[in-house]
Amino acid sequence: MAHGREVVTYAELETRSARYAQALRGAGLRAGDHIAILLDNRPAMLELAWAAQRSGLYYTPINSRLSVEETAYVVDDCGATVLFASTAVAPLARAVRDRVAAKHFVAIDGSIDGYVDADAFVAGHSGDPLDDEREGSPMLYSSGTTGRPKGILRPLTDAPFGTEEPVGRLLNDLMGFTAGKTFITPAPLYHSAPLVWSMSVHRTGGTLVLMEHFDAQACLDAIDREQVSHGQFVPTMFVRMLKLSNDARAAFDGSSLEVVVHAAAPCPVEVKRQMIDWWGPIIHEYYAGTEGGGLTWISSADWLAHPGSVGRSVLGEIHICSESGEEQPVGGPGVVRFGGGANAFEYHNDAEKTADTFDERGWSTLWDVGYLDADGYLFLTDRLTFMIVSGGVNIYPQEVENHLVLHPKVTDVAVFGVPDADLGEQVKAVVQLAAGIDPGPDLEAELIAYCRDGLAHYKCPRSIDFEAELPRADNGKLYKRLLRDRYWEGHGTRLL
């Protein structure tokens, strides 16, 4: 642990995760059942993930910044039999307790009303492996165009526990990570990439340095102190490290770093240039989704020759298609689809969204728009879904719109992302007020507070503008792009 300096050995991880696996089996869970994990970054998060992974179970880490309603939705939607929660989120855990159908509630590192302490949950169970260990799977929740996130459900393989998985090969082959190397994870483990990459470090036999939370100076200190060789970041972290004082940046040695990778959000070209100038040509980038339909990769050297690109495909074939499905010529923009590389998956409890993601050829999409250059490098330019990516976190506008339109002073609302130098995008709302209601700063503050009462704060608008009438067609379709384009004037693409 980067801040508290707690150390967990492989032997301890083995015993603790096996003991949780035994306790879950004792609670009646069998292969294909589900647990939910509501924890901050701490060793138990990985111990529980490994317990499920080695037991043939599905496991869903839950964003601890969600509201009570949002958290309860995920717990019930994933079908969790057991909910684990840490004392750091005790108020949320208590509020969710009586709103979900889970059968068992377990508190980590302390006591929570209505929860069994972890020590009591595992009491009487050994730290020996189960006799029938099989690979489980995370079921992580991805944003979409509908008002709720959807779980990405993959069929269990029934493979023996210990079977190699694709991210491990990427870590080893593309990043040169081997046993004895040290990897830093500065982001929350309830997100897909931090969790999966961290577990791949364990599969490889390396050392994982886990930050309790990201802090730019603390991150640099941990890299030097722990002699970190590899790591994964999001562009907002780069921005915040670049904003440190000249003295702080000069004091950073960084000579232990061999390869770092960034993803999750578009990185402004100038930010990436500055990072390469500072850290050297060790910065790689990939483009992919939790769904795993395909993946691109680009090194610093290739990026400098193709600035702004997210790379060439290393998993699946890239197809640039019109909205009606025809492939576009080199340089022609269209919907980015991947063929031939998709892992089997479905959106849990949403057959319609699953069907929409795949075309008749089996090519999948994350609904991003881009083009290929003559060398096969992919450039992203826009999103068809108006998905907002703020600080590497996906925010889907319809959920915010569905909440805000219920306010009695609001008649209509549009939510979308606008440029933000630090976060890439920030959430903007444009509101049409009810008759007789006057706009102003006080009302803006009232509506933002209303959002924050019902939604996770990171999803809520940072600012609200008012329009006399939103642009809708006679059939009710909102021309949101007409509103959003005003805020993106002067930018070469609709992505930052």
Image: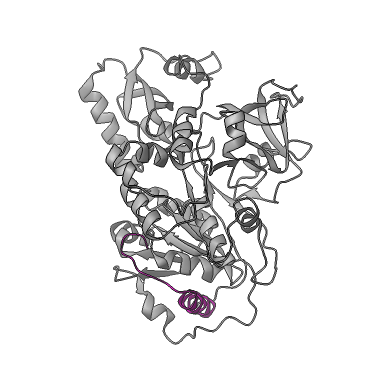
Residue 20 magenta-highlighted: yes
Q: Residue at x 36, y 51 (%)?
A: 219
How far across and down, in percent of the image, does residue 327 sit?
A: 76, 26
17 up-or-down from 263: above or below: below
Q: Quadrant of residue 72?
A: bottom left
In the image, what residue occupies the spot 69% across and 35% down? 337
- Asked whether the viewer can see residue 204, the reply is yes
Q: Depth check: 172 or 85 in front? A: 172
Residue 459 image offset from top left, x and y in percent: 38, 38
Query: What is the image's colouring?
Result: one colour
Q: Position of residue 418 (x, y in %)?
A: 42, 25
Q: Position of residue 451 (x, y in %)?
A: 32, 36
Quadrant position of residue 129: bottom right
Between 445 and 490, which is closer to the camera in this rendering?
Answer: 490
Q: Nearer the viewer, residue 131 or 279?
A: 279
Q: Is residue 271 magenta?
A: no
Q: Answer whether residue 101 is visible to the viewer in this image.
A: no
SS assignment for the magenta stretch, majority: helix
Q: Is residue 259 left or right of residue 236?
A: right
Q: Outermost residue toward the right?
A: 361
Magenta region = 1-26
In this view, 275 is above or below 381:
below
Residue at image coords 54%, 13%: 474
| Along the viewing direction, whichever of 47 and 201 lies nearer the viewer | 201
Q: Which quadrant holds the N terminus?
A: bottom left
Q: How many marks?
A: 0
